[in-house]
Image: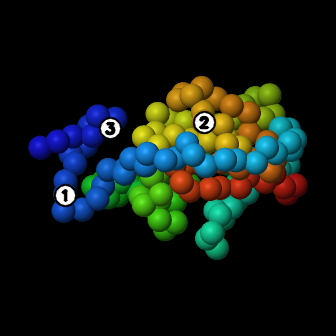
Amino acid sequence: MKTCPRCGLPLTREKQTATRVLGDAEEEVGTPRWGTAGFSSRMNLVIKIHGFDKSFTFDAAQITKLTLGRVDPDTGDAPVVDLTDCKAIDKGVSRRHAAIIRRDTGTLSLVDQDSGNGTYLNGQRLIPNQPRILRDGDEVRLGHLVLYVRFEKS
């Protein structure tokens, strides 16, 4: 039986549990955005999913590390930002694709967690496990799934 080289889980043909590799994910172009990087304790993080009537809102106090991904069908484990209902598996989103981390400096960082199809911040592919500052108005792409980030006063 074949296993996923990234997570070690078995790959089966009956049901699709492994992330489908999308060869053309780097072809999409992002739009540069220049919002503020400051994220205070009186703010909310809002993540809107492009093409879906779904968003996630987090109070600053709730944020230490938010994992973005999809449900593991074998264990039922779900990340904090569960994108399963947004066709995540078809769009190349890994189970633990990326994370948003709140820093003591009053900023948020986006980190690709060595995903199969990459994490893009405003069209630039992130190097796995290297944090990048997240700004208000940024576009984040996980494989082919696009998210928009907003910082709102609470």
Position of residue 138 measured from the top left corner of the image (x, y, whole percent) = 75, 47
Mark 2: amino acid: Arg
* Sequence-wise first label, 1 or 2: 1
The image shows residue 85, relative to residue 30, as above or below, that is: below
The image shows residue 108, relative to residue 75, as above or below, that is: above
Distance from label 1 to label 2 (Cα)?
Answer: 30 Å
Category of crowding for the residue at label 1, using alpha-carbon neighbours closer than 10 angstroms: few (below 14), some (14–19), many (at least 20): few
Position of residue 100 measured from the top left corner of the image (x, y, whole percent) = 63, 41
The image shows residue 16, relative to residue 7, as above or below, that is: below
Nearer to the camera, 4 or 144: 144
- Number of on-image labels: 3
Mark 3: amino acid: Cys
SS at mark 1 in the image: loop
Which residue is painted at 41% across and 58% down in the image? 89
SS at mark 2 in the image: strand
Mark 1 and mark 3 residues within 8 Å of each other at the beta carbon:
no
Which residue is painted at 47% across and 65% down in the image? 87
Distance from label 2 to label 3 (Cα)?
Answer: 21 Å
Q: Which residue is mark 1?
A: 13
Q: Which residue is mark 2?
A: 125
Position of residue 148 measured from the top left corner of the image (x, y, whole percent) = 71, 55
Mark 1 and mark 2 residues within 8 Å of each other at the beta carbon:
no
Residue 15: which quarter of the image? bottom left
Which residue is painted at 57% across and 46% down in the image? 27
